[in-house]
């Protein structure tokens, strides 16, 4: 009996429905199995872990690994030799970093066997694995690990399988974090050291036009030179003078804050060094600094707290030199190297030009050119408009009944007894003459006569006599010469303030 068309359509629809249910059931079965696998993988205890490879770091002579599209390969000739990059053997490879990658790969453990075959690799992210590790031992045997998706709701485990095996595994994701580094992160390159301003002891800068030398609390600083609270000094004619404090707040942080933008090349040859302007650097900055470290050292006895350990602090002296070459074409950077290295970096132009584009002697000089210390003063002589002022100071030591020694100052003004406090007030007016700016050498006037002069006679070996003279310059400024050298411009108002503070003592 023939089947009607209506019944045929009904049977076809039923068949399609049956097939659809079968597909859905199969998908659900796979998903359920994967969920069960995930749960099992996440609940694995440490006691059930086993090593994936029976390997030691020393067994491996080559490691190659890929993360996404980046592949890195490192080799060594024997377990006693150093690792090198097959991409460029001259690259300064960080041995500990590569060793850590190999050690981690050798120590991968199996958290769970997820499947006994590779039929559903795609479901675990293993059809096109995100990561791949290849290790070769001394006998030429290769061990390959493919790593896929994270398992379940946790990210600390990954699906994986080993080439030549049929199992899908759950492993720790630690290996992935070790691999997820670029080549630059695995290279051992010098870095500009980190230190605070107070740790710097000496700064020296030199280029074709100038030199600058600064000292932090120099050991041979005399009382005559120790002025105010500053610890930074420059030297002029063998005498320490205090650094201009307003300028040091920009200069010193710039030195401690040097950072490199990028590494241009890791090992420049002679021709490249010449091209970067670093064969004979255009400028050099050398910084001496101290490094202080503390460590716990065991002692033979216990302290009051019952501990056998004490903190021992050691201080070492270090130095770093930044060599500055050409400016990068079309960029706001300069080529630079550290010490005698041939790794070439880019250094921010703003930092470089703080030195190269300023007259550093002007930038660093104190604007109090006549500074000295009253403790060593023996005589002060001032001349202005035919009048003079002369202060003499005598120091004696006195000891009280308890043995404490004090210094007593006896002062005279123009031959008559004078109060120490007033003598110090006059001295303060003289040493606090403030320059407005430094006069460029080409603008200094050498033919002007002094309208004001002052000389300190001291007991200091380095400053036995200090003389400054003030002469006419232009409608706004006077010119001040210190020890015969014209350099400073002071305003008319500054000069008038000085004179008015001394007028009643001039004879």
Image (cartoon, helix red, strand yellow):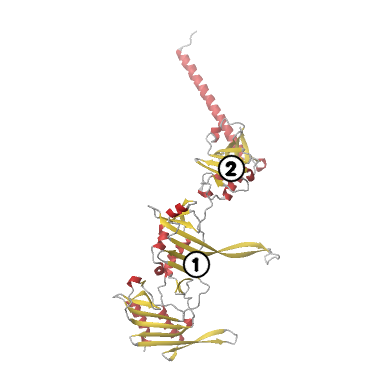
Direction right: furthest residue: 300
Q: Nearer the viewer, residue 382 or 85?
A: 85
Question: Horizontally, is 118 left or right of 13 in the view?
Answer: right
* Residue position marked by numbered label 2 in the rendering: 62
Figure quadrant of residue 384: bottom left
Q: Does residue 33 appear anywhere in the picture?
A: yes
Residue found at x 48% / y 62%: 256
Q: Secondary structure at mark 2?
A: strand
Using the numbered discs, state the Cα–Cα distance from disc 2 to disc 1 in whole angstroms.
Answer: 46 Å
* Residue position marked by numbered label 1 in the rendering: 202
- Cβ atoms at labels 2 and 1 below 8 Å apart: no
Question: Horizontally, is 216 left or right of 162 in the view?
Answer: left
Q: Does residue 261 appear anywhere in the picture?
A: no
Q: Nearer the viewer, residue 224 or 328?
A: 328
Q: Mark on residue 64?
A: none
Q: Residues within 10 Å of mark 1 (few under 14, many from 20)?
A: some
Where's residue 187, x and y in %?
53, 50
Q: Nearer the viewer, residue 471 or 294?
A: 471
Q: In the rendered structure, which disc, 2 or 1, sits on the residue that comes first in sequence? A: 2
Where's residue 332, x and y in %?
39, 55
Q: Secondary structure at mark 1?
A: strand
Q: Residues within 10 Å of mark 2 (few under 14, many from 20)?
A: many
Residue found at x 49% / y 69%: 215
């Amino acid at each position: 009996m023939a089947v009607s068309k209506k019944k045929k359509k009904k049977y076809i629809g039923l068949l399609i429905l049956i097939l659809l249910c079968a597909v859905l059931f199969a998908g659900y079965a796979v998903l359920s199995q994967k969920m069960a696998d995930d749960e099992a993988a996440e609940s694995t205890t440490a006691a059930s872990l086993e090593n994936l490879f029976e390997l030691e770091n020393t067994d491996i002579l080559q490691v190659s690994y890929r993360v996404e599209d980046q592949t890195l390969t490192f080799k060594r000739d024997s377990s006693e030799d150093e690792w090198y990059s097959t991409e460029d053997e001259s690259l300064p490879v960080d041995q500990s970093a590569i060793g850590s990658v190999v050690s981690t790969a050798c120590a991968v453990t199996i958290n769970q066997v997820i499947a006994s075959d590779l039929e559903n690799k795609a479901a675990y992210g293993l059809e096109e694995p995100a990561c791949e590790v290849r290790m070769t031992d001394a006998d030429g045997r290769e061990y390959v690990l493919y790593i896929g998706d994270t398992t379940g709701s946790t990210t600390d485990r990954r699906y994986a399988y080993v080439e030549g095996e049929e199992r899908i595994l759950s492993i720790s994701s630690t290996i992935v974090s070790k691999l997820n580094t670029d080549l630059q992160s695995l290279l051992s390159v010098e870095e500009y050291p980190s230190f605070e301003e107070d740790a710097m002891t000496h700064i020296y800068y030199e280029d074709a036009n100038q030199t600058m030398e600064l000292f932090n609390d120099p050991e041979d600083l005399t009382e005559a030179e120790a002025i105010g609270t500053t610890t930074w000094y420059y030297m002029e004619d063998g005498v320490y003078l205090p650094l201009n404090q307003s300028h040091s707040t920009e200069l010193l942080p710039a030195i401690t804050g040097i950072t490199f933008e990028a590494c241009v090349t890791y090992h420049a040859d002679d021709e490249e060094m010449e091209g970067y302007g670093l064969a004979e650097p255009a400028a050099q900055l050398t910084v001496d600094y101290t490094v202080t470290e503390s460590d716990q050292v065991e002692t033979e006895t216990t302290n009051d707290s019952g501990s056998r350990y004490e903190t021992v602090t050691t201080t070492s002296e270090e130095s770093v030199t930044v060599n500055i070459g050409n400016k990068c074409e079309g960029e706001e950077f300069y080529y630079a190297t550290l010490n005698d290295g041939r790794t070439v970096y880019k250094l921010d132009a703003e930092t470089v030009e703080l030195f190269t584009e300023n007259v550093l002697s002007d930038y660093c000089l104190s604007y109090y050119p006549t500074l000295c210390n009253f403790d060593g003063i023996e005589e002060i002589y001032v001349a202005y408009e035919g009048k003079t002022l002369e202060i003499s100071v005598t120091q004696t030591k006195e000891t009280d009944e308890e043995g404490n020694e004090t210094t007593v100052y006896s002062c005279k003004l123009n031959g008559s007894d004078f109060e120490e406090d007033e003598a110090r007030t006059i001295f303060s007016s003289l040493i606090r003459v403030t320059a407005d700016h430094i006069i460029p050498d080409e603008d200094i006037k050498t033919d002007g006569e002094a309208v004001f002069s002052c000389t300190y006679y001291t007991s200091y070996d380095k400053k036995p006599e200090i003389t400054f003279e003030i002469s006419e310059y232009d409608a706004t400024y006077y010119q001040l010469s210190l020890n015969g050298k014209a350099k400073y411009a002071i305003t008319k108002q500054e000069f008038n303030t000085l004179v008015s503070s001394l007028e009643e003592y001039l004879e």
